[in-house]
Image (cartoon, rainbow, N blue to C red):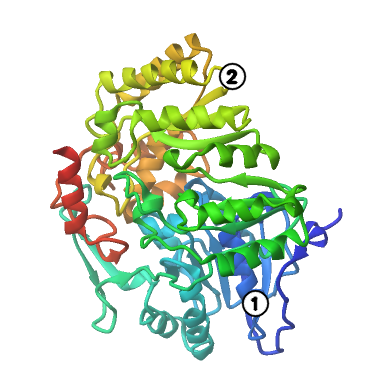
């Protein structure tokens, strides 16, 4: 079989490691095609592979580069919760105990990073020696430098030294006590006086953001070159992890953005502009004008979700000329009241105008993101979504309209982290499906059961680890999780306590010792404002 690595075009200089270089395996707990499409994975791998003091080999579930026999570090980029089963399987394949407590001086240190672990690492904490919280750019250098300094020391000393580095979280150095086996968290404390009481996520503040370091026909998006146009989002919708977790909002200047884009277009004609809210880049109109020039006529351009009130006829026109059939916008709900609750600063007129501009600019379709089960939602709010789509049909009759809809899931470090999943959401998804079908609108709901699993992991504490280990042998359905909860009854809180319960604001949260974007007090103020 031909190696997929042979098909890669690299956009950086791969170094020749020195003989004494640190031996590292850097994995992604999914297939090559999925992993290599992750911009975060590409960024970290390129940083490792361009150093002479590191010898790095890549590992995926289906392929691998030649691996060192005795690695010193084994790391994973972790961006989808349910990939944890693959992660544990890869550790077993490498002969590494999956539990941190079972590893000895002869084993490599296992580290992890990525959005899942920065948000709430606790359900996975017992599988990792070190977790990197926040952006890779400011974390990797001090992590590797410290590791090189202590590489010959006993494991316990290595972990203590790494725990001193800002943003490096060593879970085994923190003790967690509970009011009872199945009760609430009582305290989270460092086990040694030298260990910091809290760990703060690290933030990249440079004038450049990430761009693809490799282009390949075997990526999930074939031959795509990705450029991060913004990081975070200034809107602060109350439920949104992408906004709160990645604060502050950062934008590179066009002076660095345009050369980055041109570097990629020298090797491919597919360009993806990424970010939670790319049209809010202060120079976005100038960027679009630049890409509208005749020398880019051959380029196929795709955009991540754009803010509704920035959809203009000229943007739609450029996208349709550059091979895009449709555009995606997040509206969350058709209810003006509920949009105020969640801090979605958006008027119904702006949504209708976006549809009108998309149609006039020659796009064929418009995709919407929606959500059910949001805090304080009523049946009337869901009916308002149906009413909105009726208006959209009249406003832009030629557009193919699609609504992708998820169930609200409470996320750590957001104002709605205290609010549980609303079981009525399941009924509301069915209602939307039935009513939108009458209007001829395509409805793509995310699985309600999957949302419950997501909520469990997003609000979980360390007591979940044995349950997760058990579930991976049963399959990933909700039934598997319920079965494991039954078998472990009495050893951890019940399923509902994690998933559907509203937590009092004074609850000690599993991630209380990990500082992310905003202080707890500020999040509580945002929650009060939402409910008011």
Considering every residue shown, the one lying at the far top of the view is 438
Q: Is residue 208 above or below residue 311?
A: below
Few, some or many residues within 10 Å of mark 2 (<14, 14–19, 20+): some
Residue 448 visible here: no
Residue 4 on image: x %, y %:
79, 56
Q: Would you say 317 lies left or right of 236 here? A: right
Q: Would you say 438 lies left or right of 59 here? A: left
Classify residue 12 by image quadrant.
bottom right
- According to the image, label 2 marks what residue? 398
Residue 205 on image: x %, y %:
43, 72
Q: Quadrant of the C terminus?
A: top left
Classify residue 430 by image quadrant.
top left
How far apart are the alpha carbons under marks 1 and 2? 61 Å
Residue at 51%, 76% in the rendered image: 140
Residue at 63%, 68% in the rendered image: 45
Task: Answer whether labels 1 and 2 touch (C-beta < 8 Å).
Answer: no
């Amino acid at each position: 079989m031909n190696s997929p690595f042979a098909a890669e075009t690299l956009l950086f200089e791969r170094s020749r490691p020195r003989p004494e270089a640190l031996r590292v395996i850097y994995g992604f707990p999914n297939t090559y095609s999925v992993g290599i499409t992750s911009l975060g994975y590409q960024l970290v791998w390129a940083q490792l592979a361009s150093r002479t003091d590191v010898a790095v080999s890549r590992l995926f579930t289906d392929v691998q580069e030649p691996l060192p026999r005795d690695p010193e570090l084994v790391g994973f980029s972790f961006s989808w919760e349910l990939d944890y089963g693959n992660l544990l399987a890869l550790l077993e394949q490498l002969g590494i105990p999956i539990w941190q407590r079972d590893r000895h001086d002869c084993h490599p240190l296992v580290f992890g990073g990525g959005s899942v672990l920065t948000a709430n690492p606790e359900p996975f904490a017992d599988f990792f020696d070190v977790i990197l919280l926040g952006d890779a750019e400011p974390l990797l250098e001090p992590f590797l430098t410290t590791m090189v300094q202590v590489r010959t020391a006993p494991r316990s000393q290595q972990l203590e030294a790494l725990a001193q580095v800002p943003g490096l979280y060593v879970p085994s150095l923190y003790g967690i006590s509970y009011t009872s086996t199945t009760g609430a968290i009582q305290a989270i404390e460092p086990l040694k006086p030298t260990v910091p009481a809290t760990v703060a996520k690290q933030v990249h503040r440079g004038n450049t953001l990430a761009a693809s370091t490799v282009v390949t026909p075997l990526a999930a998006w074939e031959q795509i070159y990705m450029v991060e146009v913004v990081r975070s989002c200034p809107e602060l919708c109350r439920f949104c992890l992408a906004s709160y977790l990645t604060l502050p909002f950062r934008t590179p200047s066009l002076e660095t953005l345009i050369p980055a884009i041109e570097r990629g277009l020298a090797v491919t004609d597919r360009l993806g502009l990424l970010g939670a809210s790319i049209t809010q880049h202060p120079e976005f109109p100038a960027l679009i004008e630049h890409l509208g020039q005749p020398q880019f006529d051959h380029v196929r351009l795709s955009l991540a979700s754009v803010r509704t009130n920035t959809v203009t006829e000229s943007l739609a026109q450029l996208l349709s000329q550059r091979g895009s059939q449709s555009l995606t916008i997040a509206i969350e709900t058709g209810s003006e009241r509920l949009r105020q609750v969640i801090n979605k600063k958006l008027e119904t007129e702006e949504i209708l105008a976006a549809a009108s501009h998309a149609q006039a600019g020659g796009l064929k379709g418009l995709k919407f993101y929606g959500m059910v089960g949001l805090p304080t939602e009523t049946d009337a709010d869901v009916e308002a979504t149906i009413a909105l789509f009726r208006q959209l049909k009249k406003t832009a009759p030629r557009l193919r309209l699609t609504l992708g809809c998820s169930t609200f899931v409470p996320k750590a470090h957001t104002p709605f982290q205290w609010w549980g999943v609303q079981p009525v959401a399941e009924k509301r998804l069915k209602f939307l499906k039935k009513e939108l079908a009458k209007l001829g609108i395509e409805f793509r709901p995310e699985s309600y059961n999957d949302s419950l699993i997501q909520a469990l992991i997003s609000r979980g504490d360390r007591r979940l680890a044995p349950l997760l280990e058990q579930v991976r042998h049963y399959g990933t359905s909700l039934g598997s999780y319920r079965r494991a909860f039954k078998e472990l009854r009495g050893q951890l809180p019940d399923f509902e306590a994690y998933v559907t319960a509203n937590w009092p604001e004074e609850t000690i949260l599993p991630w209380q010792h990990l500082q992310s974007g905003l202080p707890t007090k500020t999040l509580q103020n945002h929650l009060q404002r939402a409910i008011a």
